[in-house]
């Protein structure tokens, strides 16, 4: 009987164990990295929610820097029936490097001013953050705000003077301002007096009512402002177009500089706050509020050509000092999304500002349907602004009719249920 001797291939087993250990180590490292990523994002979300601060450093702020085609292609990888966008490079190396560089340093390579802004007292006061970008602004260039040359703010560390923000002082020392708006004359067929006012559901006003445009003024200037040819004309145009579409609209063209005693441009939103509150007190049916401005950007960044015609681009501005700013952002998004679908290129997106980078509230806590719209720039023409105003009126009218229709349906349903309950109670009483 022969004895059998078994041998063990040590080298082969060693190789197997090394492979297992390497795989396990990789798995552990990936698990740890994933856990750290989730914790960092979670902590960032908690801090953002508590502070109501700028979301740029959060995942939402990062995704705002990405093009829509990037998300389309990502979904196409998981959904076989969905086709990605082949004609456009969804995420280039340049976009990735710019996004990561800005996330790490808060410096935009497309905006040289951001390189030194953080080192100068008050230098970051003009910074806004993207919440949603439009196809007309894929490089994420934010709005530009300049005070009139004769009203340049005197910036001190800790003060809040950008975009017409109120100076940091004791509210008790600020004299209450209640300017009397000069209402536009109503069309003859719209009724008069109180009855006409009650039909108004949209309120358009201008915190910086003298903002104008270089091509429309005879005198050359770097920062055009004018008491007559100004942004109030665009607001008036929007009112007329909304009225044509069956949306009752009130327009305030009050000139704060000529009507407010000891006028200070830096208190612009205090003045307009009184205007809005007064309008709301006079008409409880007002439910949509638009503060129309003109941005200070140059023509190449404020104009888009659609079907051979030039349109002024728009920014939507949301104030994060308002504790319910996300509701206002959702309202702005309803307009922005329709612009993206029907007039791509006009919207430069929705941008947020905190109390440290602007007024931070912009009267938006008065209504969830309140937003700043900055139309065009200093080099646009009035005609280009009118075209955009017509487009905005068209889309806003659709939204107002939809919201009013939903409210009417709810009210009708409530009345119906009340009547049915009353009849049921009467029958029950009769039977008993």
Image (cartoon, grey):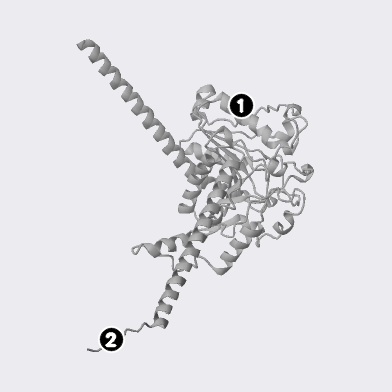
**Residue farthest to the bottom, as pictured:** 2
Q: Position of residue 430 (x, y in %)?
A: 22, 11
- Image quarter hosting the N terminus: bottom left
The residue beneath circle 2 is: 4
| Residue contact between numbered discs 2 and 1, judged by CB atoms under 8 Å | no
Q: Which residue occupies 70% across, 51% down?
A: 214
Residue 348, compared with residue 161, is above or below; it is below
Residue 129: x %, y % from top left: 61, 51
Q: Earlier in the sequence, mark 2 or mark 1?
A: 2
Dot 1: element:
helix
Identify the element where label 2 is drawn. Answer: loop
Between 49 and 245, the one lying in front of the other is 49
Looking at the image, residue 260 lies above or below residue 36: above
Q: Position of residue 334 (x, y in %)?
A: 48, 45
Residue 309 visible in the displayed image: no
Tell me the crowding category of disc 1: few under 14, some 14 to 19, or many 20 or more residues within 10 angstroms, Cα based. Answer: some
Is 79 on the left or on the right of 427, as rendered? Answer: right
Q: Quadrant of residue 17?
A: bottom left
Q: Quadrant of the C terminus?
A: top left
Left or right placement of residue 334 versus residue 226 in this view: left
Q: CA distance from mark 2 to mark 1?
A: 104 Å
Left or right of 17, for residue 238: right
Residue 75: name its quadrant.
bottom left
Q: Is residue 274 above or below residue 374?
A: above
Residue 422 spot, x, y in % from top left:
30, 17
Q: Which of label 2 and label 1 is nearer to you?
A: 2
Question: Closer to the camera, 267 or 90?
Answer: 90
Q: Label 1 belongs to which residue?
A: 278
Residue 137 in view of the camera: yes
Q: Is residue 153 above or below residue 185?
A: below
Which residue, as the protein is rendered here, is positioned at the far front? 1
């Amino acid at each position: 009987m022969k004895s059998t001797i078994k041998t063990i291939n040590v080298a082969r087993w060693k190789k197997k164990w090394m492979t297992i250990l390497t795989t396990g180590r990789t798995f552990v490292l990936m698990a740890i990295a994933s856990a750290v990523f989730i914790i960092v994002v979670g902590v960032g979300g908690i801090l953002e929610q508590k502070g109501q601060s700028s979301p740029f450093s959060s995942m939402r702020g990062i995704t705002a820097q990405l093009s829509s085609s990037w998300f389309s292609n990502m979904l196409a990888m998981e959904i076989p029936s969905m086709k990605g966008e082949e004609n456009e490079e969804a995420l280039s190396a340049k976009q990735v490097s710019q996004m990561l560089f800005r996330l790490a340093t808060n410096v935009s390579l497309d905006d040289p001013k951001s390189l030194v802004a953080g080192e100068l007292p008050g230098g970051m006061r003009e910074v806004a953050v993207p919440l949603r970008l439009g196809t007309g602004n894929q490089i994420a260039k934010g709005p530009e705000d300049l005070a009139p040359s004769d009203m340049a703010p005197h910036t001190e560390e800790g003060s809040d003077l950008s975009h017409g923000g109120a100076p940091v002082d004791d509210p008790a020392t600020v004299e209450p301002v209640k300017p009397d708006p000069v209402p536009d004359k109503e069309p003859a067929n719209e009724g008069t007096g109180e009855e006409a006012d009650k039909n108004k559901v949209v309120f358009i006003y201008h915190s910086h009512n003298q903002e104008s445009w270089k091509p429309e003024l005879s005198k050359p200037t770097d920062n055009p402002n004018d008491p007559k040819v100004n942004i109030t004309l665009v607001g008036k145009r929007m009112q007329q177009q909304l009225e044509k579409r069956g949306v009752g609209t009130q327009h305030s063209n009050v000139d704060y500089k000529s009507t407010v005693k000891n006028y200070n441009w830096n208190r612009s939103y205090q003045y307009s706050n009184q205007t809005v509150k007064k309008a709301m007190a006079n008409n409880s049916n007002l439910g949509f509020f638009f503060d129309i401005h003109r941005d200070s950007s140059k023509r190449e960044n404020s104009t888009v050509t659609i079907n051979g015609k030039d349109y002024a681009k728009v920014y939507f501005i949301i104030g994060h000092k308002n504790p319910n700013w996300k509701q206002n952002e959702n309202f702005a998004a309803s307009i922005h999304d329709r612009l993206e679908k029907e007039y791509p290129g006009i919207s430069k997106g929705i941008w947020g500002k905190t109390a440290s980078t602007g007024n931070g509230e912009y009267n938006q806590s008065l209504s969830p349907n309140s937003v700043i719209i900055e139309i065009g720039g200093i080099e646009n023409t009035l005609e280009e602004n009118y075209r955009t105003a017509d487009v905005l009126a068209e889309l806003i009218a659709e939204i107002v009719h939809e919201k009013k229709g939903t409210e009417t349906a709810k009210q009708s349903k409530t009345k119906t249920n009340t009547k049915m309950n009353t009849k049921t109670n009467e029958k029950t009483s009769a039977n008993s």
